[in-house]
Image (tube, rainbow, N blue to C red):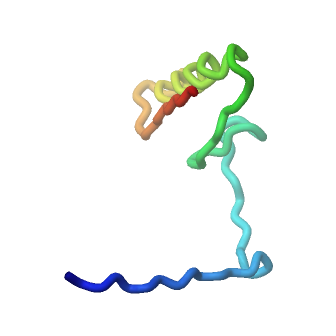
Amino acid sequence: MKKAQKTVPVLVRLADVKSKQVEWLWKPYLPAGKVTILEGDPGAGKTWVALAILKQTANPPWKRHATGCEMCLQADR
């Protein structure tokens, strides 16, 4: 059995990070191509909003055939 190699974390100063222009799906709420977390109290309508957004991005009215990847993950306690 091979011995596991140690990994060393890579540290980068924030001053050295180059900024990138953000493309928005719905400015300033939903950045395109990024992970977005929708949180709130139970019964507030999070699932309804998430599915409405998913429906519009999966099959937008301005495109006849949309291409892309959408995912909806729901986790409740």
Q: Nearer the viewer, residue 43 or 6?
A: 6
30 vs 69, left or right, is right
Rendered view: 50 above or below 69? above
Q: Nearer the viewer, residue 38 or 56?
A: 38
Image coordinates of residue 67 in percent, x first then y, are: 41, 37
Rendered view: 68 above or below 53? below
Residue found 53% across the figure and 27% down from its top: 54
Image coordinates of residue 5 in percent, x first then y, are: 38, 85
Q: Which image quadrant for residue 41? A: top right
Image quarter where the C terminus lies is: top right
Residue found 70% across the figure and 35% down from its top: 26
Q: Nearer the viewer, residue 46 or 17?
A: 46
- The answer to whether residue 1 is seen in the rendering is yes
Image coordinates of residue 55 in percent, x first then y, are: 52, 22
Image coordinates of residue 13 in percent, x first then y, are: 74, 81
Q: Which image quadrant for residue 38? A: top right
Residue found 40% across the figure and 28% down from its top: 65
50 vs 71, left or right, is right
